[in-house]
């Protein structure tokens, strides 16, 4: 009986130590901003997508640098057409001014496969939609500064 109680006590203590050891991690960390795409820049093609494109974020990893994936649903404006050669990369900039009057900015990039889909989408007719996936490794401190705030969200196309 004493061995059984001792075994349960040890198991409970180990479980507590394991769970306490993970409290410094970023499990379940969520990131969001209050608004959608607020602007575009890059080439003349930047006038193709509608502003206000919705965004969603996923955050993974532990420690001071986290893996962030953003999905932006873009749609051609009416009467839009490819104006320039597409950029070699497409980026998503999320920035915001802090209380100390300094800007915090994170940059996420579409990978090579996504870039091919973007180039195809640029030549599609008005009304065509595409989910653009951006990825990057971002300091958690920067995410904390921008999290749940109204930000300037720029699609660099």
Image (tube, helix red, strand yellow):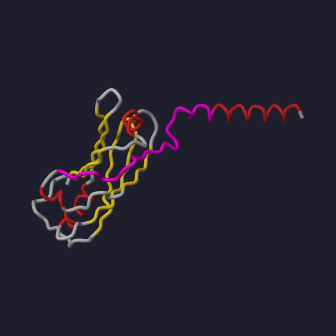
User: Looking at the rendering, which quadrant does residue 126 occupy?
Assistant: bottom left
Report the front residue among 59 and 50.
50
Residue at 52 percent across and 44 percent down: it is 28
Q: Position of residue 89 (x, y in %)?
A: 20, 52
- Considering the whole magenta stretch, tell me its main secondary structure: loop
- In this view, the residue in front, 102 or 17, is 102
Image quadrant assignment for residue 66: top left
Image coordinates of residue 68 in percent, x first then y, are 38, 46
Residue 26 falls left or right of residue 140: right
In the drawing, does residue 83 fall left or right of residue 156? left
Work out which quarter of the rendered image holds the N terminus and state it: top right
50 lies above or below 65? below
Identified at 29% across, 62% down, the residue is 74
Question: Who is closer to the viewer here, 2 or 87?
Answer: 87
The span shown in magenta is 18-41
**Which quadrant: the C terminus?**
bottom left
- Residue 46: x and y, percent? 18, 56
Q: Hey, which residue is sitting farthest right in the picture?
A: 1
């Amino acid at each position: 009986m004493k061995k059984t109680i001792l075994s349960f006590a040890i198991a409970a203590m180990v479980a507590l130590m394991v769970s306490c050891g993970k409290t410094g991690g970023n499990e379940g960390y969520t990131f969001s901003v209050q608004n959608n795409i607020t602007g575009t820049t890059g080439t003349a093609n930047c006038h193709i997508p509608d502003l206000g494109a919705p965004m969603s974020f996923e955050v993974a990893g532990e420690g001071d640098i986290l893996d962030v994936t953003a999905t932006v649903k873009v749609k051609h404006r009416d009467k839009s057409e490819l104006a320039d050669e597409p950029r070699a990369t497409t980026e998503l900039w999320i920035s915001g001014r802090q209380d100390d009057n300094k800007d915090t900015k994170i940059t996420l990039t579409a990978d090579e496969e996504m870039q091919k889909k973007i180039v195809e989408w640029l030549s599609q007719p008005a009304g065509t939609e595409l989910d653009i996936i951006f990825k990057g490794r971002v300091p958690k401190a920067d995410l904390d500064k921008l999290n749940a705030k109204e930000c300037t969200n720029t699609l660099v196309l």
